[in-house]
Image (spheres, grey):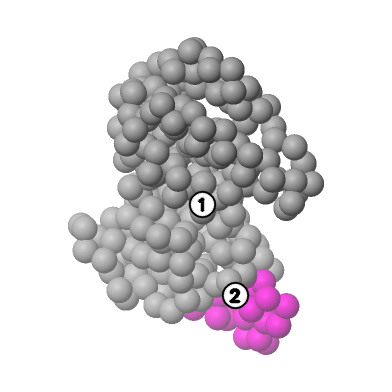
Amino acid sequence: MEIRILGPVRVVTEGRTDNALGGSKQRTVLAALLLAGGKVVPDARLSRLLWEDRPPTTATAQLHTYASRIRRNLDGAVALVRIRSGYQLDAGSVGSDLSRFRQLSGEGHRALRAGDFGGAARDLRAALAQWRGEALADASEQLAATERPQLEERRLEAEEALIEAGLCLGQHRRLVADLTALVAQHPLRERFRAQLMTALYRSDRQSEALTTYVDGRRLLAEHMGVEPGRLLSRTHQAVLSGDAALRHRLAS
């Protein structure tokens, strides 16, 4: 059995999606408890996540109902207990796509730092495969607004690390298209832009690499009122000077 939140919130048993999880509120409670990592989630927080600042008078009773349904739908595979005025989820042996993503991305980052680029690429690719779309896609807007940005940041960091591994493996020509799309999606994210500049430079497209920097500098000034950071500036200088070392390493 696995709980999935990196996409629509689902419980999967033996590879088969369990569609009996219930409505958005029940999915929100399960996801919030999983994200708490075994800590007690107070009723007040669950109430805000479900009803914002307009909880019904039956809020406590409804939370009890959602908890009971979660226990039933997970067939007793998890320990969901009432502690004081809150709930605690002990997932036990039940896995989750979040824990799998964290494990694999951590291993990938460590392999990258150790110079095992092939292993890093393998682990990071497997980590990103845990995502099935936008995290918490069918939970409440309140939970998504609170938790999704942090989850998305971890995903983007894994993307950056995977691309770095690919560049270190000499895959720059193949990565240009992917990086072009990522820079378009995240135009203010300097690491993607620096990686695209590196891939273009290594593909003998120096002028396009310089244009990528100019575009980034303009966008940073317009939207954030700042100059490019150290990584992007050093990559620009390396491309501008035709630094041969940039063909063998990433700017850092």
Q: Which residues are magenta?
A: 47-66
| Percent x, y of residue 84 | 65, 62
Asked whether the residues under the numbered discs 1 and 2 touch, taking CB atoms below 8 Å apart as contact, a structural biologist would say no
The answer to if 57 sits in the magenta stretch is: yes
Quarter of the image for the N terminus: give it: bottom left
Residue depicted at x 45% and y 61%? 134
SS class of the residue under badge 1? helix
* Kind of residue indicated by mark 2: Leu
Badge 2 crowding class, 10 Å Cα cut-off, few under 14, some 14 to 19, many 20 or more, is many
Mark 1, residue position: 184
Mark 2, residue position: 50
Please name which of the two marks, 1 or 2, marks the residue nearer to the observer.
Answer: 1
When the figure is inspected, residue 192 is found, relative to residue 204, above or below; the finding is below
Q: CA distance from mark 1 to mark 2?
A: 34 Å
Residue depicted at x 50% and y 36%? 208
Q: Nearer the viewer, residue 193 or 72?
A: 193
Q: Nearer the viewer, residue 233 or 152?
A: 233
Whether residue 129 appears in this view of the structure is: yes
Badge 1 crowding class, 10 Å Cα cut-off, few under 14, some 14 to 19, many 20 or more, is few
* Kind of residue indicated by mark 1: Ala
